[in-house]
Image (cartoon, rainbow, N blue to C red):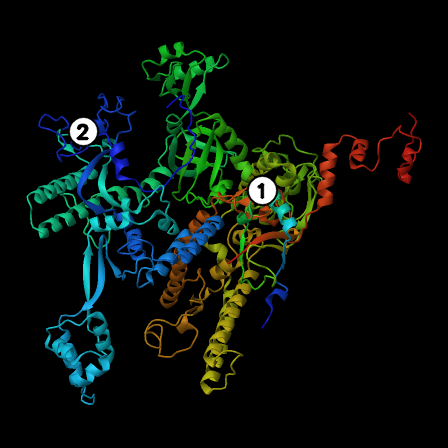
Amino acid sequence: MRNSTPKDIGSINFGLMEPEEYREMSATKIITADTYDDDGFPIDMGLMDPRLGVIDPGLECKTCGKHSGSCNGHFGHIELAAPVIHVGFTKLIRRLLRGTCRECSRLLLTEDEKEEFHGQIDEAQKLGRDLNDVTKAAIRQARKKDRCPHCGEVQYDIDHEKPTTYYEVQQVLTSEYSQRIAGAMQGQDEDAERMSPDELAAETEIDLSRINEILSGSFRPRESQRKAIEKALDIDLTEEDTNKLMPSDIRDWFEAIPDEDIEVLGIDPDRSRPEWMILTVLPVPPVTARPSITLDNGQRSEDDLTHKLVDIIRINQRFMENREAGAPQLIIEDLWELLQYHVTTFMDNEISGTPPARHRSGRPLKTLSQRLKGKEGRFRGSLSGKRVNFSARTVISPDPTLSLNEVGVPDRVAKEMTQTMNVTERNVEKARRFVSNGPEGHPGANYVRRPDGRRLKVTEKNCEQLAEKVKPGWEVNRHLIDGDIVIFNRQPSLHRMSIMAHEVVVMPYKTFRLNTVVCPPYNADFDGDEMNMHALQNEEARAEARVLMRVQEQILSPRFGENIIGAIQDHISGTFLLTHNNPRFNETQALDLLRATRIDELPEPSGVDDQGEPFWTGYDVFSELLPDDLNLEFTGTVGEKVAIEDGQLIEGTIAEDEVGEFGGEIVDTITKIHGKTRARVFINEVASLAMRSIMHFGFSIGIDDETIPEEAQARIDETIDDAYDRVEELIEAYERGELESLPGRTVDETLEMKIMQTLSRARDNAGNIADEHFTEENPAVVMAESGARGSMLNLTQMAGCVGQQAVRGERINRGYENRTLSHYKENDLSAEAHGFVENSYTSGLTPREFFFHAMGGREGLVDTAVRTSKSGYLQRRLINALSELETQYDGTVRDTSDTIVQFEFGEDGTSPVKVSSGEDNEIDVEHIADRVLDSEFDSEQDKQEFLGRRPRPTNLSEHADDRLSIESTEVSSDD
Amino acid sequence: MVDVSQHELVPEHTVLEEETLEEVLTEYDIDRTDLPKIKRNDPALPDDAAVGNVIKIVRDSRTTDQAVVYRLVVE
């Protein structure tokens, strides 16, 4: 494979193949069904003929002289005793039979119609429409003709019996015509009047004697007479007569179709003639496409295709023998059908209506089309996607000490996956060290390649000697080491952040380790998730991965243009604790908080406490991580203003909306203004600082944190009792018929709504009462407020009251007849009978409440399961439709055939990640322009010159500077 | 009958002059059949639009104020 230049494909033609072409490309004609003789040698002109290619290593191909591996194999051919239909074209054959004349084979369209369809085909081609629609319409038009417009021959219907049988259906005079006429003349119904032969003769204008002859059955009425009688008596004298079309008939029929008629049907007559759809010669795939395998016991086991070919040849021979012996037509037809069956299943063994050909064991054979079709088929399974080398998969686990750009790779993986090192003068020493470490020592090598192309395996035994031989020009396949770039992926790969490049950090044990902040883009957690890693194999790939795919390059999501990577969960609780109410730290504490960051010196202390010790505040500590020139002001998570001036946090609490994963304001701003590298450093440091601070404060949650005093519980009970009373009142009003219905609703619906409202208010009140007893320090409150995890609703349900359970958005109504459970009276409308849970999770649910809760919970589970599968399929279809669209250099979006889809990418030609805008902050063009100019020009003067406000003094003329503006008149020409 | 082309949500559709069309086609280096299509019976089309004409559509855009799109009238 080395040094092979890529070939350029000029063009590809699709069309039918001529029988003569099959013969020409054939290496040999196959006549015997046997494969090997008794000595195990392939039989000449048998299915394993050595001219068809070689599969056994060491043998030479009799056709091309190459050895196995380099010889691709050669086709053979079988001369079929009789033509058979190609199953792949049954629909087209049917169409052609229906659209052409049975006598003169010409298309059943007038010249004008042909002309029109010709034009339509050209237009459809130009507009990129489906040609099938036009050709289908042409056939539909042709089928309408009763007679051939060219030769006048009557046309019959063509019946297609799947898969490969065609009949001509003719309406002919039934054999019991005399009985039917007589019956009609007698009158089947009592009231119908009888008709005498005289009257019939008069009405049909046929001689009376003829009528009598017809009635006696001795004369078959002609077509016109039949029609007249049918009309007179209002009866049907015809019956269907089916006439089977043999493949040879169809072939003769198709041979006579003129070239210009086929063109109208969208077939190119230069490449494909319709008669080639009826096979007279069958190509035999090369042995390389159907290799036989030798089993352990020395027995040969043939490929399914070979088995099928054996069947075909056997029947083919029997057919010929029988025909030469002059066997009866019936037997010939049976054999013909059998041959057709075998050729059909050779190409497709999953045709409906035909039993699949089976192996001796009863397993259906895997024939040609089964090799191509479906997920595991050649296209989807072997070409679009395949198993790859240099990949690894294992369980993932967290490691907060890694940078978000890194991935911890188990040493045993690093020793298996290699990178190619081109040895030069400058790295020989290094390369030798790798080789001398051998395949077992860690930064070792597994293979070396000499300049002559020979590949040698590095083993424990030869590594020392081999290392000495390594010289510039060699290649060394060394182990993965720290700093190598690899691609890391977690399925389902729904967006581009599902595949990112990481730098390797080789580590002990068996799992891949990643920083927890990259969990959101991969949607990963550590409950057993596995991920894949791919080692890159050439310098271009490594460079591209590093520049485009590294995690830090993916901080901004193209979906919404804000950061998708940021602090999560405990990080947010940590920064919240650190900055909420701005706590004080002494020197040791402050240094401890910052010890996992780059900062190793504290700033000036904020002040001195009562003991005379200097102290630093949470703001000071956090500000150490910020870039010095950061200025920001916005409303934060807690609802207060957050202000940062010159990289100092002035006020506010740092939580989810500040440093969080989906659009944390500070992370987002740093990424956009200070760059991705700065953002990576910031996120890493925020994560470490947050972990240190959450450890400093201590953070745990227990059942006591959600327990409220008895007094509060009593108040909650009271509110709920109150709500019960109100529900009771509503029900009473409803039963008395006094309940006023809301506009657009029935009384029943109104009652349900009002009950739901009352109960939900009751739960909210219970929640509020519970809330009053939680301090700001309560860990659940900290998590809910900071946005780290959970919400106040979760807290309400834990401490106050779980509330109404719902299935399909309504109170629970299902179960028994007119009641939810047998514990209640029928038609009980009360709150508890329809799934209101008055207890909290801490106080515990009653069995009935628990049951209703399970009902509501189950619906949620089912919903998510259904949603993921549905949206997954939707996504797949969307991606397939969009995958070939590409933004061109001129800003347009086009598909592969160069048709325009968008005239400007997204109407504005901007990438969401390169633009900063939100609902409430417009793009500040002035500000951006100023920043660019400031960084671009060193002096104010250069800048002004660039902007053109201050033109360069000129010496063209004394008056040339007149156009200078007034404020810059002091710049006069004094050259 | 309501004339939908007068509705405020229907952007302006105008038939493109042949000369300007040539400019557009050279600008994008395409044949007119490579343009997106619009059906002749589309109610937003002006009455004088015939099959084979190219329509210029100017729509309001959230991000660029106005976005221009061309479409080929087909059967």
Task: Identify residue type, mark 2.
Answer: Asp
Residue A49 numbered tag? 2
Where residue A520 sits in the image (x, y, percent)?
Answer: 49, 45
Residue closer to the observer: A740 or A694 = A740
Horizontal arrangement in the rendering, residue A393 relative to residue A674 (left or right)? left
Instruction: Please state the total of marks drawn on the protein image.
Output: 2
Residue closer to the observer: B64 or A240 = A240
Question: Which chain is indicated by disc 2?
Answer: A
Quadrant housing the N terminus of chain A: top left
Where residue A27 sits in the image (x, y, percent)?
Answer: 23, 29
Q: Residue at x 17, y 35 (%)?
A: A302
Quadrant housing the C terminus of chain A: top right
Asked if residue A228 can be seen in this view, the reply is yes
**Vertical order, A211 against A471 (above or below):** below
Residue A506 found in image quarter: top left
Residue A972 numbered tag? none
Question: Which chain is indicated by disc 1?
Answer: B
Asked if residue A385 can be seen in this view, the reply is no
Density class for disc 1 (Cα within 10 Å; few <14, some 14-19, many ≥20) is: few
Where residue A157 sits in the image (x, y, percent)?
Answer: 26, 61
Q: Are marks 1 and 2 on the same chain?
A: no
Residue closer to the observer: A812 or A835 = A812
Secondary structure type for disc 1: loop
Horizontal arrangement in the rendering, residue A730 relative to residue A71 (left or right)? right
**Vertical order, A204 against A302 (above or below):** below
Secondary structure type for disc 2: loop
Measured Cα–Cα span from mark 1 to mark 2: 55 Å
Residue for badge 1: B29
Density class for disc 2 (Cα within 10 Å; few <14, some 14-19, many ≥20) is: many
Where residue A63 sits in the image (x, y, percent)?
Answer: 24, 25
Task: Identify residue type, mark 1.
Answer: Asp
